Image: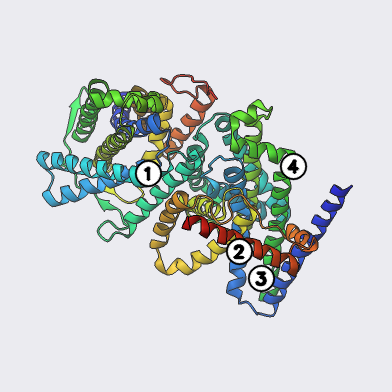
Amino acid sequence: MINLKNRAFNILTLTLVSTVIFVILLILQYFKVISEYTGLLLTLAGIYVIVSLSLNLITGFTGQLSLGHAGFMCVGAYTTAIAIIKYGMPIPIALILGGIMTALFGLAIGIPTLRLRGDYLAITTLGFGEIIRVIIVNLDSLTGGAAGLKGIPTFSNTGDFIIDAIIRFSWVYIIMILVIAVIHNLINSSQGRAIISIREDDIASTSMGVNVAYYKVYAFTLSAFIAGVGGGLYAIFFGYLNPAMFGWLNSVNFVVIVVLGGMGSITGTIIAAVVFTYLQEWLRVFADFRLVIFGLALIILMIFWPKGLMGNKELSITGFIRQLRSGEFSPRQIKTKWNEFRQKKGRKKDGRAD
Amino acid sequence: MEFIQQMINGISLGSIYALLALGYTMVYGIVKLLNFAHGDILMLGAYAGFFILTFMGVTPASMLVAFIFSMTICAILGIVIERTCYKPLRTSPRIAALITAIGVSTLIENGARVIPFMGPNPKQFPTFTSINYDVFGINISMVQIVVLGVSIILMVLLNYIVNGTKMGKSMRATSYDMDAAFLMGINVNKVISFTFAIGAALGAAGGILYATAYPQVQPYMGLMPGLKAFVAAVLGGIGSIPGAMLGGFILGVAETLTKGFISSKLADGVAFGILILILVVKPAGLFGKNTNEKV
């Protein structure tokens, strides 16, 4: 009963908080408090959040490195775009179709590679990311080849620039919230615990009765699906597709985001993805040096700061509210805590003096 | 006749893959690390050769100098990369080392793009004027003979180092069981560095040969050969030296046959298809041992 009450509280608070943030951002955009450019970046950051979260599901939570997420985005983007242009499908169906197509590719790669131990997934996905571009260039009757696919209709065409921007932002934001909810709920379910146990020790989890291969493929296919949907949004967002947009360096970008945010942290990934999107724009002046910085950042992060921003912890709004209500942050509590902290510090100093 | 011609082209290309695959397989055999930066070592080796050959002109003597110079440079680089980037992570989870390897690879590729005298644009690689020999109607070019000859010499040399020297014995012991080797008084750190150095030197030689066969150099040139060499290493059984050689040749032949008889566009996809196939049918590879994980 208490559990149910807790859940209802969680769902209500989180829905409320995400709606409030959403409405605030919409109002800010509508009254041009934040510029159109910032609005565009926010929308792009939303897409980055979606794809990075999907990568975090397989790399951070399941512990299998995937280097082909740009390739998955590519499949999703082209499927969605072709479904809209050639078959006139509505956007939601085209997005889901893009996701399903990508998930099928994920399944085809995952089944042979993930039942093995070792790093085969990394190299297979890397190969996939390269090959899929070759295939798309060669299927030029369908995909426009190397010249690219033009004329993808945007989310809406009302003629009013601000309304269009807001509708575009809403699409991405709402799908992002859905993706966050799906991944958060998955990770906190029994399946999620099975997935995390694989990351911690796959032999131990096998002996506890977890079907390791099944859960690895499950997580990977879901990850591919989400990346495909993210790719579909990307296609509609830009209105133009070109195989060169999904190169191997884009896959590296997502790895950088996940590592920076903390492998195994949803909130960490969200923060890192938003920061990264802005950083990418600011660092544009440095041109090619940007990628040198990213490479260097990966090495330094892994050696000196492997936990990233958040490690595997989460920023929890509901947890924070609960702490507030339990009087954790009442002035008296804070005062006693502060005193305890000072005493501890003093003791440490004494210890050193001895 | 056409078939034999393509076979010869394939064997020539395959020997380059074999050289690269040896680097992958030796490093993997000892530290269980998939060294993504190996393909980029090929690129650096090719650039080192490029500078020597443009500086000295193309003569047999300058070719020799180019090989020695670029192999030395890359061997040193291999040690530096191992000491600075991989050694601190030897006890961390494997995924951390993998991500670092990606970082090293990105750093080298894009570092090469911003270094002024390397730059992002492809450069013409100076090669000798190729003479074609006609043997019973089959065309064999001078380049192919050089590529195959150098590869075979290097492979024989490697075979001697691994099987005939004390260092090779230590390498085999370390790859068999690192902790036990350490307890037996083998300097494991030295052995690992030596392995990276040899792997990188072979990669550098492969780079010059690759650039001689496809005469241009550019910063991303190592990506695809590196990927294919990894497939070759898996095909032969990762960790197995004869396996890597055979895998390289098979992959080279498969690629040129596809190029010659099916479609040149599919050639890059073939390696990928072989990888999936081998993982489905015989994941341990042709020469690999089926090992069971023990807790």
Front label number (4 vs 1): 4
Quadrant occupied by the C terminus of chain B: top right
Residue at x 66% of width, y 71% of height = A165
Distance between the alpha carbons at the discs numbered 4 and 3: 36 Å
Question: Dot 2 corresponds to which residue?
Answer: A342
The residue depicted at 53 percent of the width and 55 percent of the height is A260
State the separation of the CA atoms marked 3 and 2.
52 Å
Evaluate whether label 3 is on the same chain as label 2.
yes
Q: Choose the circle earlier in sequence order: 2 or 4.
A: 4
Judged by depth in the image, the label closer to the viewer, 3 or 2, is 2
Residue type, mark 2 in image: Arg
Helix, strand or loop for disc 1: loop
Mark 4–mark 1 Cα distance, whole angstroms, equals: 38 Å
* Callout 3 touching callout 2 (CB < 8 Å): no
Is residue B11 positioned above or below A69 on the image? Answer: above
Could you confirm whether marks 2 and 1 are on the same chain? no
Position of the N terminus of chain B by quadrant: top left
Q: Nearer the viewer, mark 4 or mark 3?
A: 4
Q: Quadrant of residue A277?
A: bottom right
User: Given the image, what chain letter belongs to the residue carrying mark 1?
Assistant: B
Q: Which residue corresponds to mark 3?
A: A165
Label 4 marks which chain's residue?
A
Neighbourhood count class around disc 4 (C-alpha, 10 Å): few under 14, some 14–19, many 20 upward: few
Residues at marks 2 and 4 on the same chain: yes
Residue under circle 1?
B37
Q: Residue B41 in the image: x percent, y percent?
A: 31, 43
